[in-house]
Amino acid sequence: CNVEFYPSFLDSIHFSPVLLSKAVMSSSSSSALEMEIFQYIDDHQSDFIKDLKEWVAVESDSVQPHLRKEVMRMMVLAADRLAALGATVNSVNLGSHQLPDGRVLPLPSVILGELGKDPQNPTVCFYGHVDVQPAKKEDGWNTDPYTLTEIDGNLYGRGATDNKGPVLAWINAVETFRALKLAMPVNFKFVIEGMEEAGSLGLEKLLEEENQSFFSDVDYIVISDNLWLSNKKPALTYGSRGNACFFVEVECGSKDLHSGTFGGIIHEPLLDLIALLDSLVDSTGCIQIPGIYDGVAALTEEERKLYGSIEFDLEEHRNNCGVKKFLYGTKEEILLHLWRYPSLSIHGIEGAFHEPGIKTVIPAKVIGKFSIRQVPHMDLSVVKQQVAEHLEGVFSKRKSPNTLKVSMPLGAKPWLAGVNDLLYKAARRAIKTVFGEDPDFIRDGSTIPVARMFQTITQKSVMMLPIGAADDGEHSQNEKISRYNYIEGTKLFAAFFLEISKLHRNSHETSHTETIN
Amino acid sequence: CNVEFYPSFLDSIHFSPVLLSKAVMSSSSSSALEMEIFQYIDDHQSDFIKDLKEWVAVESDSVQPHLRKEVMRMMVLAADRLAALGATVNSVNLGSHQLPDGRVLPLPSVILGELGKDPQNPTVCFYGHVDVQPAKKEDGWNTDPYTLTEIDGNLYGRGATDNKGPVLAWINAVETFRALKLAMPVNFKFVIEGMEEAGSLGLEKLLEEENQSFFSDVDYIVISDNLWLSNKKPALTYGSRGNACFFVEVECGSKDLHSGTFGGIIHEPLLDLIALLDSLVDSTGCIQIPGIYDGVAALTEEERKLYGSIEFDLEEHRNNCGVKKFLYGTKEEILLHLWRYPSLSIHGIEGAFHEPGIKTVIPAKVIGKFSIRQVPHMDLSVVKQQVAEHLEGVFSKRKSPNTLKVSMPLGAKPWLAGVNDLLYKAARRAIKTVFGEDPDFIRDGSTIPVARMFQTITQKSVMMLPIGAADDGEHSQNEKISRYNYIEGTKLFAAFFLEISKLHRNSHETSHTETIN
């Protein structure tokens, strides 16, 4: 399946590099105001790291049900932090949700915060999450995942980069203006949630409900929940893949069996499941589900050229992940397959023996878990149907008496932004000021469903402004953010406040002048 | 692969049903002595169940390294119990062993016990184990696995039937003779270990070392570590399959990866592993490893006929395990495939995501675990080589840059006994006395490597005398032994002591008489 040979079709909101280069006029020299702000941030590094240590210490894992109370505790900490900033804080109760096993769990509240109401200022809404992926020391961490530990300039801990570090960097950037008694250049709004790693349950409904109230005066939405493409060079992100998660359950009965007493005479559910999982992707990475590539937007020659100009070190990326070889040999192929083509990954199996050692068991009920990172313009409901039909077809050929269930417990859509918005220009200038270079304009292979959700519901301009480096290891063992990225990221946010304020006022004055002329 | 069509070959030590029926002369009526013993056992049911409750309460799981100290504690309890019986107890230190991850763990001692030295008596050595398979309430147990709980006449708890219940039944049968101040009909020896579920590490070496000393005066060896074929009808077991356990490890690097950041551009180790596991067995249960059936002893017409006479309720067996349908439709096919043909079961995967919920991870190192129940005359080293070559062949076709490692951490041989031994005659009589019917002569699809080990090393007659019912669920959730089987099993052992004593003395007198004549 050579996914590049589809009829030509260009995404309508794809950006033009020509427009971008004309639009950006800022110099890389810092103003006196910026110098004062940056000095304050440098002087308060220890305080900012202490804040992060306190947040990382909370095991706010939203994936595992028994840790839900820790997520709740984390939400209280975050609300207190915003209140200390002087913000008005509203913790919105979202009710509860049901787990696949039938249990009902309370959802953490979503924090809606507001600070400043100057009508001259643009209103920037920041979204972040303070829940984390599961992590245990024995998964292979060198340090305790819930004790932020600095080694060689890196701050190790679960949530350090995804997403507690960036949330605190934003808060501390705001705090800096307050501490220096500076006029706030923008009005701030905050949306902080605790269910992002579990699919942002309840958030979409809340955004819809708040669209005419909380969001009515918001001009721009900023999310900082992804990483740069390189370890050193900053980036701005204008798109992300979606994620359709699937559970495939095969069951032969209610109890596990002994492989000596039943091995050789029954259709083992795990054998069925392994055959099903083995039918999904071939050894070249091509998804084998019939029709799955039909909805993928075709790549035009113009779009392909954009990929050539991105600075991306294949070797560095390979070193970051530790594999010996990628499926593709060129930078362009790698980026295309990460950003604008779908992929299918198998994550694991629930219900089978998974511990060290030997257990001669035939598991009675096993649940395979995989996900498809889907891209524009794949339709989630079509994908779901294609997957179910494919698996049912493979299963029926096995003539197994076992029970098959296919479900899609989570379906997040892809996202694509307009990169000529003021938001992107302001961020580009701020990056130039703090880091001395232009950012890469990139997409993200990961799913950030909130970006798509915010854009679709609020119709505001949404930008993703990452501060973590490519080797931060989000979702992995030894997740970290470097002290450099955390502190310079705080400066970047502060500089961005000034830039968006300036560009926003200019654009409004220009509109006004034009109206008079 | 129709495994029944191999050149004709009959196992040399296969039993003849004609010989058996001639040899057994006992009636089913109980003697006064037996009545007295059975009455005592009935009167002390509560004490015997209390003993079992105390033993089940120890989480003596030998599979999971962190529970090794509980195994050690269990060995002390067992040694104390034998000492209280009046036995001489020797706890033999076996040193330590290395885990696959490099850690070194101490091995539990093996208990060698002795009680009685009457030269007129036969010496019967009983083997049992007091370690258990892993069990957690959340695996699907209705009761706490380590709190023996009686519901509707069944005693639920991990180890209740495998093997703590039978070990205590034997001890309590001996205790009964002591309590009633009866002459001991046999001299007792005990071999009690704590590593059976982890492959009886160190036991083989100990047996070899003790062969000329501890075992020199042993006449018979009895093991009670398996189940009846039916829920109601007693059985005697004369053979068991072996077990060759395999680990298949595929690794791409040292850390898990995010499926958004790397999905679509790397050769995922779990995809490789699933393809490898999927190559092992087809949907009809036939093992796909080339040459694997070459060593299987061929089935003769004479042998096939033996299977026809066994009382075995297919429907009951199906209900016990809860599956909708077996791979085969007749009793003979089912028993042949359980007892004298190899099977391959996949147990699970270590290193992948296995918890409830979703984790969008690409695991960096995954270990597939499967085992082959092999039969006479398959050669373990040949099987190991066939498996490794097959997997390496499948893997090389995938052109994956990942690392593959195949190992066989455990290889237990099959076992086949001589069923015309006095041992089997005595047990058959005892069963008739206690249960009022003849037993089924069966093999066991499970591996009991100690049976093979004891026979090979000591060259003594070895018998397996189960007291648990087919639906006891060893290795499964809700493992149990019924109160009936536990108590009648205790009587069976006591009756067996009397029968083997009588038959042994008779056979020795006969030999003497023959010499005189």
Image (cartoon, coloured by chain):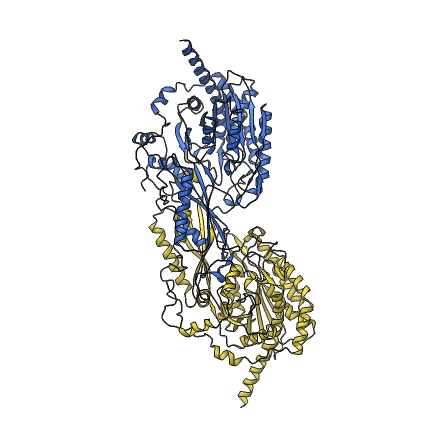
Chain colours: A yellow, B blue
Quarter of the image for the N terminus of chain A: give it. bottom left
Relative horizontal placement of residue B217, taking residue A46 as reference (left or right): left
Residue B296 makes an appearance in the image = yes
The image shows residue A429 at horizontal and vertical percentages of 57, 76
Residue A464 makes an appearance in the image = no
Most extreme residue toward the bottom is A517
Residue placed most toward the observer, B388 or A81: B388
Most extreme residue toward the top is B517
Residue at image position (58%, 27%) is B90
Relative to A302, does residue B49 appear above or below in the rendering? above
Residue placed most toward the observer, B429 or A492: A492
The image shows residue A405 at horizontal and vertical percentages of 41, 52
Residue placed most toward the observer, A429 or B298: B298
Residue placed most toward the observer, B387 or A61: B387
Relative to A398, does residue A200 appear above or below in the rendering? below
Q: How many marks?
A: 0
The image shows residue A203 at horizontal and vertical percentages of 53, 64
Relative to A512, does residue A318 appear above or below in the rendering? above
Relative to A202, does residue A7 appear above or below in the rendering? below
Residue at image position (41%, 51%) is B395
The image shows residue A467 at horizontal and vertical percentages of 58, 67
Relative horizontal placement of residue B148, taking residue B276 as reference (left or right): right
Q: Quadrant of residue A382?
A: bottom left
